Amino acid sequence: MQRIAVLTSGGDAPGMNAAIRAVVRKAIYHDLEVYGIERGYVGLIEGVFHKMDLGSVADVIQRGGTILHTARSKEFMQPEGRQKALENLRQRGINGLVVIGGDGSFRGALELHKLGFPVIGVPGTIDNDIYGTELTIGFDTAVNTVLEAINRIRDTATSHERTFLVEVMGRNSGWIALEAGLAGGAESILVPEIEPDYNEVVERLKRGIARGKRHSIILVAEGVESAYKVSDEIKTRIGLDTRVTVLGHIQRGGTPTALDRVIASKMGGLAVELLLQGESNLMTGIVGNKMVTVSLEEAVTIKKTLDLEAYNLAGILSI
Ligand code: ADP
């Protein structure tokens, strides 16, 4: 192993830069040459590689987004595209690749592994929806961004004695809604993993109003339903005046939290070590505050389950 490359792919996440920095610096520490590939698999196919040095990753640990940029590539979904990518890597004498991204990116990484190229995955997605790790890079920052929004919304909700619906990211996964809801004391949390029970939402609101509660916050993961539709459901059932806030892409940006920087640094460092050990087809993860690995196959095929205990607890605490 003399030369490795790193790319970021799919949806960006705060902390990806800290992971790139860790890969680059750990590689250089071990006397490896390291290349950064622009725009994920697009740059891999087009051959947009930059040699990275210690300075290339200076002053990036605190920045959200990804300095390597990210993209989605249809061409990489085809065998011909992947063959081009493979040739670009081989031509440059690169013998290991670190892919920082979500499950889609790992499906691509797995295909490269199947072609005989050593690949290690580092989970970077705000959704925290990847099997084999308790945390993905960017999740903690996104939860804190939502929490800050909830705090602000709660101020105005209290002043005007209103019910607010806050729509957060999570098409297939309720992790952001669950953790931000638990931390922010949301009155109800709607997640895609659990069929929404509007009667229960309304009963909760009624119970709250009966004991003098004048404001409520309901978190809705985007995969459940549009928060506007949920708002209509509530209006038709109890005629309550509600307001809707869709947080959207602000959840993707921002300076990464300490936790995201720490896990990104550890995962990036471990990815390089794994390549040096001759490993491939692995994803780095954290379970019980310990570094672990899981095969890319498992990471992309096994569905990570939502923490139902935490979900039920959130329901009890916001009664
Ligand atoms: P994320 O990594 O955030 O889940 P995507 O699902 O958009 O993002 O995947 C990122 C890229 O990974 C895609 O644009 C595509 O190039 C590649 N990819 C996804 N699925 C596959 C697959 N089954 N085979 C090959 N490449 C894939």
Image (cartoon, rainbow, N blue to C red):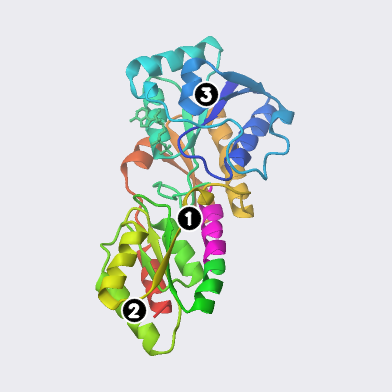
Q: Contact (CB < 8 A) between labels 1 and 2?
A: no
Residue 63, visible in the rendered structure: yes
Where 87 falls versus 157 (above or below)?
above
Label 2 vs label 3: CA separation? 53 Å
Q: Which residue is mark 3?
A: 96
Kindly report which numbered mark, 3 or 1, lies closer to the viewer in this rendering. Answer: 1
Image point 31% across, 72% down: which residue? 235
Where 315 falls versus 14 (above or below)?
below
SS under mark 1: loop
User: Which quarter shows the N terminus?
Assistant: top right
Label 3 vs label 1: CA separation? 38 Å
Nearest the viewer among 138 and 91 is 138
Assess whether residue 142 is covered by the magenta stretch.
Answer: yes
Outermost residue to the top: 91
Outermost residue to the bottom: 211
Q: Which residue is mark 1?
A: 247
Q: Contact (CB < 8 A) between labels 3 and 1?
A: no
The span shown in magenta is: 138-150
Assess whether residue 45 is covered by the magenta stretch.
Answer: no
For residue 87, side relative to residue 62 (left or right): left
Where 28 falls versus 246 (above or below)?
above
Helix, strand or loop for the magenta stretch, by majority: helix
Q: Say which label, 3 or 1, has the lower sequence index.
A: 3
Q: Which residue is mark 2?
A: 204
Which amino acid lies under the numbered mark 1 shown in the image of this protein?
Leu
Q: Position of residue 84 (x, y in %)?
A: 43, 13
Nearest the viewer among 103 and 200 is 200
